[in-house]
Image (spheres, coloured by chain):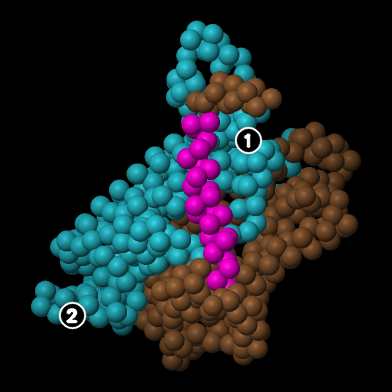
Chain colours: A cyan, B brown
Amino acid sequence: MGLDRGEKIFNVFNVIFMLFFIAIIVLPLINIIALSFNDGYDAMKGGIYLFPREFTLVNYETILKDTTIYRAFGVTIAKTVIGVIGHLVITGAAAYALSKSYLLGRKIFIRMGVITMFFNGGMIPSFLVAKSLGLTNSFWVYIIPVLFSFYDMIILMNFFRSLPDSIEESAKIDGASVLQVFFKIIVPLSFPVLATIALFHGVYQWNDFFVAKLYVTDKSLYPIQYYLYQLLTSAGAANSAKAGVYISKAFTTQSLQQATMIVTTLPIMLIYPFLQKYFISGMLVGGVKE
Amino acid sequence: MKSKFKQQFLSQWELQVLVWPSIILMIVFSFVPMLGLIIAFQDYSPLSGFTGSEFVGLDNFKAFLGDKDFYNVLTNTLGISLMKLLIGFPLEIVLAILINELRLVFFKKFTQTISYLPHFLSWVILGGMITSWLGSSGLVNSFLLSTHLITEPISFLSNANAYWWIATLSDIWKEVGWGTILYLAAITGIDPSLYEAAKVDGAKILKRIWYITIPSIKNIIVLMFLLRVGSILGANLDQTLVLQNSSNMLRSEVIDSYVYHLGLAQGDFSFATAVGIFSSVVSVTLLLVANFLTKKLSDSSIF
């Protein structure tokens, strides 16, 4: 296939445009990394772009010396792992049962779910319900309200329905129970779509700070994002600046914030490129087939 | 009849066990809060609860419809959402088409990976980054100063008039790449023989994009457009919370943050719930109207 002249020109402009686009995404991020490795007071003079000017590790040393950050990391890891497993078990189980057209009550359930996609109680009534259930200042407030998602259930259900019935039938004839069929046959076959839902819910759990802002005042239950949120707002900044006075003078509140942002984001950045192929195929299942 | 139902139910009890936890969760966390909307028509006090609070009819609705702040908040919500829609939505489609036209497989994959990356950053992280980039010694001011475009650093985030742009551009920066996924998937599904035929007929690349690619992904474009219109009053709460400060408040307060501040920070539960109801009723109406119009114009729709 030969390329005509117009196509060649188009391709050149397209590549230039994409390089520009990549630069707009990547360069600002590199700027934050550079600042996180730079002396805080030096950074205040401005003019730091892609490399640190006065290299130092003191920002990272300082935040990693603060034990509350480990606690916050622990809470985040716990809520991400428990949240993802719980979400997959509860939402996946419902999706499997509802993928059977003979399930009694199926229509009512689906209708109820569709209603929840268009109407909801909104922030205040939801807050009052969770509060009256005693979820305030409890670790479970991160987990229980989001165990089930109708949207994720639909994606999983559509996938389960696309699997051939014959595999299940033969397992049943061999005497396998419903749960055995689900765990030994359905789950392994559904790995890409389960991985997609797991990634989405995992990212939600890792990134969410609003639930903590609404329901949690107990500092030992703060997740890492809320810890950072407080560090970024003025009250938190004042605290950390005070703490800084007697340790060192090489950092500022800003340089500490920048190092914390990098530390907080690193785990997701390291994991996501490996999961990319799964979420792309998973999005295909959920979106386009519709 | 009844015993047949019982028999059927018992024969599928294992499946029923799998579905009941979800039903209970849906009732507790979706339907009970819907009943809780009743407090919008009450003068709700946490001490007396749903049942004991005084019923005041539409007073809360009248109160915010007569409130100057409310119209300011509504303007901000619509302004920011419309800017995101008008700039971000076409940009996603253009970007998807251009990424699809990249010929080097490695470069194409690399571009995609980079473009999805910001989506995985939380708004807390991004809020911190934006504060740093736009700060007086940050990236943007350093650059503008060194090129002598300005002589004094600009404090972007405390300038209320700049806020709509900051909110729009930061949202696009974060989500534009992610928004291309579905379009790219749809483009991949287009029959290659259509392009071959067009090539034989002498159609140049821009014509092929205009007459084959875009019509082939029209349905997904309409679907995404409808969903966007339906959520036009829900300007991102997380974004607002991290970028808002006392000097840009006038232009940064949107309906969701207004509900949060009135309801949970000031404890005016009933008033905030009434505003929330207004917002969801308008959203559903907008969705239905947009759905109706697109059905008339292009015969594709959600319902």
Q: Residue at x 40, y 63 (%)?
A: A131
Kind of residue indicated by mark 2: Lys
Query: Is B12 positioned to the left or the right of B188 in the image?
Result: left
Asked whether residue B29 is drawn in magenta, I would say yes
Does B293 lie within the magenta span? no
Task: Classify residue B106 as left or right of residue A68.
Answer: right
Residue A242, label in figure: 2
The residue drawn where x is 40% and y is 41% is A86
Q: What kind of secondary structure does the magenta stretch mostly adopt? A: helix
Where residue B13 appears, as percent x and y from the top left, is: 52, 26
- Please provide percent x and percent y for residue A262: 32, 60
Taking A196 as reference, is B76 left or right? right
Q: Secondary structure at mark 2?
A: helix
Find the magenta span and give its range: B16-40
The mark that comes first in sequence, 2 or 1, is 1
Look at label 1 and name its amino acid.
Gly
